[in-house]
Amino acid sequence: MVVPLYHIIAFAGLLFTIGVLGVLFRRNAIIVFMSVEIM
């Protein structure tokens, strides 16, 4: 079973968005580092 390319791109975009929002809106250093790792 092959995963369509748009599913992979959507998932990567979602993870990147979560990472960016974590960096922008969190002030805890550990959470910011985790968000950078997600990106």
Image: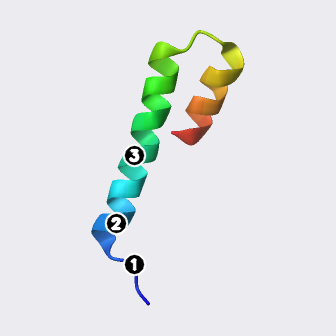
Residue type at tag 1: Val
Q: Residue furthest top?
A: 27
Q: Which mark is residue 35?
A: none
Evaluate if marks 1 and 2 touch, with contact meaning CB atoms under 8 Å apart. yes
Circle 3 SS class: helix
Which residue bears the numbered disc 2? 7
| Horizontal relation, residue 31 to residue 6: left or right | right
Q: Residue at 59% across / 9% down in the picture?
A: 27
- Crowding at dot 1, Cα within 10 Å, few <14 / some 14-19 / many 20+, comes out as few
Label 3 vs label 2: CA separation?
Answer: 10 Å
Establish if 5 lies above or below 30. Answer: below
Determine the CA span between mark 1 and mark 3: 16 Å
Q: First in sequence, mark 3 or 2: give its number.
A: 2
Q: Residue furthest bottom?
A: 1
**CA separation, marks 1 and 2?**
7 Å
Q: Residue at x 68, y 15 (%)?
A: 29
Q: Position of residue 17 (x, y in %)?
A: 39, 36
Measuring from the top left, give residue 38's x and y in whole percent: 56, 40
Q: Secondary structure at mark 2?
A: helix
Q: Which residue is mark 1?
A: 3
Which residue sits at x=41%, y=52%?
12
Q: Which residue is mark 3?
A: 14
- Which quadrant is home to the N terminus? bottom left
Amino acid under label 3?
Leu
Q: Amino acid at mark 2?
A: His
Task: Determine the secondary structure under disc 1.
Answer: loop
